[in-house]
Amino acid sequence: MLKGRKIVLGVTGGIAAYKAAELVRELVRAGAEVFVVMTRNAQAFITPLTFQTLSGHSVTTELFSLTEESEIGHIALADRAELLAIAPATANIIGKIAAGIADDILTTIVMATKAPVLLAPAMNVHMWENPICQENIQKLRSRGFHFIDPEAGELACGYEGKGRLAEIPAIVEEIRSILSPKDLSGETLLVTAGPTEEPIDPVRFLSNRSSGKMGFAVARAARRRGAQVILVSGPSALPAPSGVKFIPVRTASEMREAVLGSLPGVSTLVMAAAVSDYRPKGTSPEKIKKSRAELSLPLELNPDILHEAGQRKEKRLLIGFAAETESLLANARKKLAEKNLDLIVANDVRLPGAGFQVDTNVAKLIDRSGKVEELPLMSKEDLADCVLDRVLLLRSA
Ligand code: C5P
């Protein structure tokens, strides 16, 4: 979704300026065209050459530079921007923007642009807490400026407290969110993700290789597109997405309780979790000893959460995932019918680039009418958007 989007990135003079290099890399990696503008103070921390190399475009540093103006004028840059991000944003730039000052290239672009502006503040905790700074932020927020708050932690100046630049993935996510159409506003999506863990004894469990990447991508994409999102996830190493109600669970029974308990207000359920079909029959209260040559573990069926949701479907859209290693379409169609689904996302987990742990997937979308859409290899982020596009289609059908 960032492919070809034109982003102007303003870098101001704080120690976090070096982190802006990573932000440029991430945006370029996602396909965005990034034009960096630096204040004079920013150049004391990091050189324009770094940004020029990473962005592939010349870096703008002067308001009245003959060469820079002839290459791309500051008004052209303000017009060209689909989004203007300032990271890090110092107390100084925030104050200048709030006061309407346009005395250098960056503040002039802010004044001249019609694009949304995102500020990622980073500063000393006392500067952050200063009422003047907070009032300026309030003023800018009320004028429609977007902010991504700094994090608390150890600061470069030796203090502890709020003031560290937000994490780069969170800034990228905020940029995606601002640029997304809000075509899912009004929807409440419940997304499940990850594996479940079924305890055998206090230290062992049965699980599977699901990483949670697909479900987390659906949750993030839905929130970007304006939906209210509840994410119920089994154990996963991924960070909880911002702006999403996050309910961590462990077992299939816990997931069932969380899903069925939230269902009444939910308009679309996307079950991307790889729920363990079976669990050990009775968990041993003590660690099982290595005393026998062979050990059998009796298993019992877990509840089928999606099947239960299908029994009380009402007007809700139900979307399931089918990870298969054989007879992909036949098995997926059977699940779609048995679980009373509107759509099933089927993937052959043996294909290269598909299935567990990787960042990409190869899927077929099958709907109630039996129509099959074969999608090429794509990132899980893009697949999430394809699935959500189908939610809109199903709603309008
Ligand atoms: O039957 P199968 O496990 O292949 O079905 C896959 C779909 O059903 C997935 O969407 C999965 O999240 C859901 N499921 C469930 N409860 C289970 C097993 C699977 O909700 N116990």
Image (cartoon, helix red, strand yellow):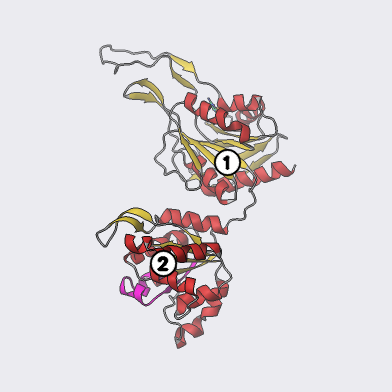
The residue carrying pointer 2 sits among few (fewer than 14), some (14 to 19) or many (20 or more) residues within 10 Å by Cα, namely: few
> Disc 1 designates what residue?
363
Residue 188: x and y in percent read 61, 41
**As shown in the figure, which amino acid type bears the numbered disc 2?**
Ile
Q: Would residue 279 appear left or right of 19 to someone viewing this image?
A: right
Badge 2 vs badge 1, beta-carbon distance below 8 Å: no
Point out the stretch of residues depicted in magenta: 32-51
Is residue 275 visible to the viewer in this orientation of the structure? yes
Q: Which residue corresponds to the image point at 42% horizontal and 42% vertical from the top-left?
A: 238
Residue 203: x and y in percent read 31, 24
Residue 33: x and y in percent read 50, 66
Distance in Å between CA atoms under marks 2 and 1: 52 Å
Residue 314 occupies quadrant: top right
Disc nearest the viewer among 2 and 1 = 2
Res 132 label: 2
**As shown in the figure, which amino acid type bears the numbered disc 1?**
Ala
Residue 26 occupies quadrant: bottom left
Residue 120 occupies quadrant: bottom left
Which quarter of the rendered image does ligand 1 occupy?
Answer: top right
Q: Is residue 41 magenta?
A: yes
Q: Is residue 315 above or below residue 161?
A: above
